[in-house]
Image (cartoon, helix red, strand yellow):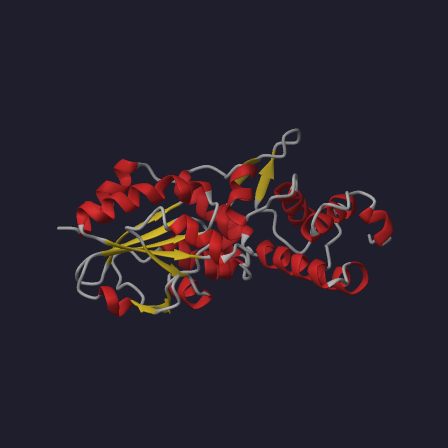
């Protein structure tokens, strides 16, 4: 399966970054029925630190994609598009989402849990039951899909964008929302102003837990702070891996948990939301 690094790099321009080099290599080398061995790539092909970091990010993302497919199918009643997959995992290299799905299709160790259009490459179906039945994905997906509605909101401790400690004790006894997002996420950009407006008018704290660091996106503090300055009504904190796990294993962005004064999760919303849905969920906890 492996070809020489020189030939792989000939497929891209010198200006492209490490992740682009890895993706272009995979495009040229994924073969039906042959698993992609990340350890071999790291040891024999991508030995530079930036390339190994990019490869590691893709390897970690690989195991999150089935979770996202299942969550999207359950929430929207249809598979996500390639563009939506790219949005969720910050795939910025052309064809990156497609090649990740090709790897899953080619690997005989994985169950066949989706189908695609032969021409467009878009997903035509996602078999949630097959994903749930797989030991590698099932527990995480079942925990995520079952949700926390009707259960006590998990406790959490993190830091604010300013570096100060912030914990769930700060909102104890008050209605609040925990809003998981990452910088540049299109659905997040769409709903954040609505949340900010309603946070100011409804008297509900919105704890905006940014996952840039947990997802290793490389967004700078300056970039995050510039965006946060436009949304002063939100309480900006960093989402830690522990916090994401406590809330069921966050794999889709945005994910929102609406918590009432008693500390119970009354509603969990996933992915794109309209104003009416957000208003209804906020109104229920603002009583």
Seen at 41% across and 42% down, the residue is 189
Seen at 78% across and 44% down, the residue is 28
Q: Nearer the viewer, residue 13 or 76?
A: 13
Residue reaching furthest top?
A: 119
Query: Can you give x and y, in whole percent of width and height, for residue 249 in the image?
Result: 44, 60
Quarter-wise, where is residue 82 in the image?
top right
Residue reaching furthest left?
A: 287
Query: Can you give x and y, in whole percent of width and height, for residue 134 in the image?
Result: 55, 57
Q: Is residue 272 left or right of residue 234?
A: right
Query: Can you give x and y, in whole percent of width and height, for residue 237 in the image?
Result: 37, 61
Q: Nearer the viewer, residue 127 or 287?
A: 287
Q: Is residue 118 left or right of residue 261?
A: right
| Residue 270 visible (yes or no) | yes
Query: Can you give x and y, in whole percent of width and height, for residue 42 in the image?
Result: 74, 63
Q: Nearer the viewer, residue 246 or 201?
A: 201
| Residue 3 visible (yes or no) | no
Q: Is residue 27 left or right of residue 174?
A: right
């Amino acid at each position: 399966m492996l070809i020489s690094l020189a030939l792989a790099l000939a497929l891209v321009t010198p200006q492209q970054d490490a992740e682009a080099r890895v993706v272009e290599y995979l495009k040229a080398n994924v073969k039906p029925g042959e698993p992609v061995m990340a350890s071999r790539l790291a040891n024999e092909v991508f030995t530079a630190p930036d390339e190994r970091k990019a490869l590691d990010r893709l390897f970690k993302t690989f195991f999150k994609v089935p979770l996202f497919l299942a969550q999207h199918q359950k929430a929207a009643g249809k598979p996500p598009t390639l563009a939506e997959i790219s949005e969720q995992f910050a795939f910025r290299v052309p064809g990156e989402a497609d090649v990740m799905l090709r790897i899953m299709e080619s690997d005989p160790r994985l169950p066949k849990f989706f189908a695609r259009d032969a021409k467009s490459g878009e997903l035509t179906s996602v078999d949630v039951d097959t994903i749930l039945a797989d030991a590698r994905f099932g527990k995480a997906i079942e925990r995520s899909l079952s949700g926390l509605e009707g259960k006590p909101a998990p406790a959490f401790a993190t830091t604010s964008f300013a570096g100060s400690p912030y914990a769930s004790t700060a909102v104890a006894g008050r209605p609040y929302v925990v809003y998981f997002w990452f910088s540049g996420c299109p659905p997040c950009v769409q709903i954040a102003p609505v949340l900010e407006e309603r946070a100011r008018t409804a008297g509900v704290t919105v704890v905006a837990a940014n996952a840039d660091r947990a997802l290793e996106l490389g967004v700078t503090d300056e970039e995050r702070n510039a965006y946060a300055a436009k949304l002063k009504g939100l309480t900006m904190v960093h989402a830690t891996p522990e916090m994401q796990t406590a809330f069921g294993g966050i794999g889709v962005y945005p994910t929102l948990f609406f918590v009432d004064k008693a500390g119970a999760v009354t509603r969990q919303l996933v992915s794109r939301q309209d104003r009416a849905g957000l208003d209804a969920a906020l109104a229920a906890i603002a009583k």
